[in-house]
Image: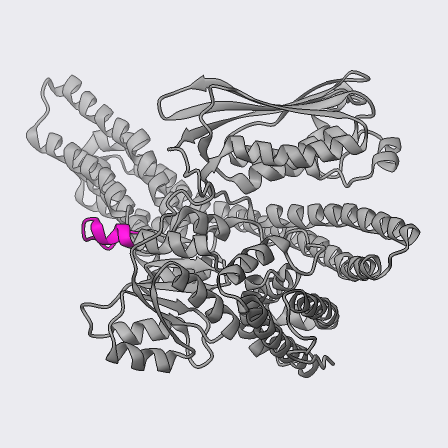
Amino acid sequence: MTFNFTEGIADKSEQGLREILLSQAKIRFAVAVPVTLTDVVLYFVLHDAVPLWFLALTVGYALYAAIPFLLTRRASVTRLQGLLIGSAISDPLVLSIWIALTGQFGSVIAGFYLFTTLGFGFRTGRSLMYLCQIVSVAGFTLVLTFTPYWQQHTVFWIALLIPTIFVPFYAGTLIERLREAREHAERQSRAKSDLLAKVSHELRTPLTGIMATTELLSIENSDHAVRRRTDTILSLSETLLSEINDLLDEAKYSSSGIHLSRTPIDLRQRIESLSETFGTMANRKGLTFKARIDPVLASTVRLDGHHLDRILLNLIGNAIKFTETGGVEMSVEIVAQMPSSYRLRFAITDTGIGIPEDFHQKLFQPFTQVDQGSTRRYGGTGLGLALSRKIVEAMGGDLRVESEIGKGSRFWFELDLERCAALSVDSPAHPNETRPAAMRILVVEDNRTSSALIRELLLLDGHQVEVCDSGIAALERLTRDSFDVLLLDYNLGDMDGVQVLRTYRFGRVDAVPALFLTADATAQTSARLLEAGAAGIVYKPVTRSSLRDALARLSDRGTAAASPTAFAPAATEVARLDRPVLRVVPVSALDEDTLDELRGLNAINAGFLRKLLAQAEIDITRACQQLSDAFANRSYAIVPNVAHALKGVSATVGAIRLATLAGALLQMSSDELEADGDHLAADLRECSRITVVALRQAISDSGASGTSAGTLHLN
């Protein structure tokens, strides 16, 4: 049998191991320390005094019980594993010493051999349990050898030794069965989630093509009857896509849980913005929609805005869906107000069909709806409320319902939210955004589209900008010239951005701070960049606000006390790491908001937009061709780097659909790419074709000639 110390530990991460050690430490204090104090009391009752050695022994054990709290605070995974093994040995040894020194009073705690051994078994598995058992038997044998009391009570000693030997073996069989049952259940759950995700993907793949083709028909045809039909197809497709995404989210949340990122949010402005969408939805059905916000509420609170939007969209969307006459009302009220926080109640009330009282609890179970007639009439998967409740519970609340047939429904939940300073009026989404002082900045970016945009944005704020398109060129430039900031792309053509930074900093004491540019918003990449010494991370698509915010934070860091922990990435950046990867695929090929921002730059620098879009077409053409060749040749090793580049340039010019597809490719393993290669290649061909058509139209609209910047030859 392989001696695996952590076979029975479900969570072998640093946090998981730390929780086990802290749990053991708490038990020592809650159980073992009181029992030892009982020993002291018994000794005092029988002898009218307690010797100093006995008191010293008690204090020593109390210190032993306290030490793990200190050792586990900042320990690494390796050290935590060592502490687990060490405690499996030291716990029975310390117990043996106590029993040996205290004689008859030690018999009070002799049963703790078994208690300790089984505790290791159920927390960590059989390996550490058997190790603890061996040390317990050896220690108790030495107690018999050196202690007169136990030599005089050999039968009592044997009676305690027998269960210490045999019970752990029986418990080991039960533990193994429990572990196998747990692993089987986990495999079943993963299989269900994988099947759900794959089926949803298979549905979404052709649906994306249907929506894209319908959109093109709508754009290219001026016949009103055709447009009405295409609008109907798009509306139904969006509804179906929403249901598919619910399936994907259910699979994802079931397997990985919900990760929240709380950032300062202007709640009043966010509710008003959402109300416009809800009002339009209600008006289409002839309903009224009202949004009430407590006037005492200061706008800015700290919460996960993305997940709050998800909850409200689901609850209000359901309210509108199941209401035929009357209206829907959303309210945000202060339940309790503290100096640094609020307790807010979010409530959605409608005058709809209502829900039977005996169905209220079942309502939040996945795939559950009131009746089949309702399912046929209103549609839906029955997942929305289940997902909403999961998110509310992750936020610290509880989603509840009041409803009566024919009189409507009321859903509400309460959240404790931290109050924040008001956000800047000029930039509500970026509370720290100010124009930093002019700096000399070296931009290292091998994608011409991205580097052109970044250079233009920095020049507008008065910075001196130099651009390098490779890691080698950047290292040569850094040896010759001095800069205030290094803007370094994570994925460069010739070498990894982290390698560039480490090579540059080797042997230097005055290295300039480096901000990484990346389209990969995963927690693993973020951790790697910060570990490499990044002063911050700017996620693509890069905007003027994100650059200003990052540079302003660097300036603040410079004026703060010198400390390696004086700076952390912006809260908005961290939020992007924890948001669900899966999201609705946008209908439009190019995002108009992004194009409007670029047009603003074009107004300052005439011709900039045309050049940027033309270069983007070249970069997108090249990247899509490389990916198409990779799928055709099954050369999946190059997919992550090319997908990263494609995601960056696509996001820069607002090609959201292509950026979404590239982001999905970026997250897939070689096995997943192999399994879905044909579908992914088809998605890529269709999405890239639509994107290039839209880019050429945007180039034409910006005043360019009709000349193409590149040609697609996708296999």
Q: Quadrant of residue 77?
A: bottom left
Q: How many marks?
A: 0
Residue found at the far right of this picture:
225
Give the colour scheme shown. Answer: one colour
Percent position of residue 224, x then y? 90, 51
Q: Is residue 502 above or below residue 288?
A: below
Is residue 643 something one can see in this rendering? no
Give the image location of residue 336, x and y in percent: 45, 18
Residue at position x 32%, y 71% in the image: 501
* Residue at 83% over, 25% down: 324
Q: Main secondary structure of the magenta part?
A: loop
Q: Quadrant of the C terminus?
A: bottom right
Expressed as whole percent of the image width and height from the top left, the position of residue 443 reads 38, 70
Q: Is residue 266 visible?
A: yes
Question: Where's residue 259, x and y in %?
Answer: 51, 45
Q: Please state which of residues 130 and 73 is positioned toward the viewer in this rendering.
A: 73
Q: Is residue 495 left or right of residue 647?
A: left
* Above or below, comparing residue 37 to residue 640 in the picture: above
**Apparent side of residue 215 relative to residue 308 in the rendered image (left or right):** right
Viewer-side residue, 447 vs 179: 447
Residue closest to the eye, 628 or 462: 462
- Is residue 396 located in the magenta-colored stretch of the structure? no
Which of 94/82 is in front? 82
| Quarter of the rendering containing residue 277 | top right
Q: Which range is magenta?
A: 555-567
Residue lying at 63% horizontally and 49% vertically, measured from the top left: 185
Q: Is residue 155 above or below residue 129?
A: above
* Residue 253 horizontal side relative to residue 404, left or right: left
> Which residue sits furthest left?
52
